[in-house]
Image (cartoon, rainbow, N blue to C red):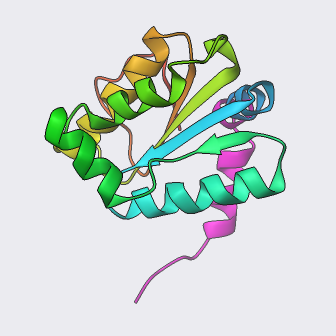
Amino acid sequence: MLDIENFDKKFKSIVSSHKWKRFQEMYNSCDNIFIFGHGGNMAIADHAAIDMSRLTSKNVMAPGSGVTAAAIISDESFETWIAKWLEFRTKYESDMSRCLAIGLSCSTTGKSSNCLVNALEWAKNNGMKTCLLAAQEKENIDDSILSI
């Protein structure tokens, strides 16, 4: 049995938190949003990118397919492919401060988690705003990367 008792209280707690308000401010201030995940979160990121593009005036992109991942991984590595995808997608971006990179994760250990953190670190080091939306706290993540 799935126990989702008090889910509404947890949700309200998250969206009223200081971190969530900071995330909302970052999102509002950016024109270009890059959202990514691994495993099932890759599909969620792709769907979210379509909905955000459709429902807002923002330019929202996600890697979107296993073909994209496989093509980049074959030239890079599993742990760096999303950072390389961000590099490809932003190569002509003149104002990286108007860009937000969002990572989605359910796991916080292993290569799949490192892949997201590496991408967020690349984004931060190149002037983008960053946020990791994770099911669990991620240890050893740079404090300048917002983690919710």
At a point 38% along the width and 39% down the height, the residue shown is: 137
Q: Is residue 109 visible?
A: no
At a point 74% along the width and 35% down the height, the residue shown is: 24
Q: Report which quarter residue 101 is drawn in.
A: top right
At a point 79% along the width and 24% down the height, the residue shown is: 29
**Residue most toward the bottom?**
1
Camera-side residue: 14 or 141? 141
- Point out residue 19 in the picture as x, y percentages from the top left corner: 64, 31
Magenta part mainly helix, strand or loop? helix
Q: As drawn, is 90 to the left or to the right of 53?
A: left
- Point out residue 121 in the picture as x, y percentages from the top left corner: 38, 19
- Point out residue 102 in the picture as x, y percentages from the top left corner: 53, 37
Camera-side residue: 5 or 15? 15
Looking at the rendering, the stretch of residues picked out in magenta corresponds to: 1-21
Q: Report which quarter residue 65 is drawn in.
A: bottom left
Up the image or down, 61 lies above or below 44; here it is above
At a point 65% along the width and 43% down the height, the residue shown is: 60
Give the quadrant of the N terminus: bottom left
Magenta highlight on residue 3: yes
Q: Is residue 78 visible?
A: yes
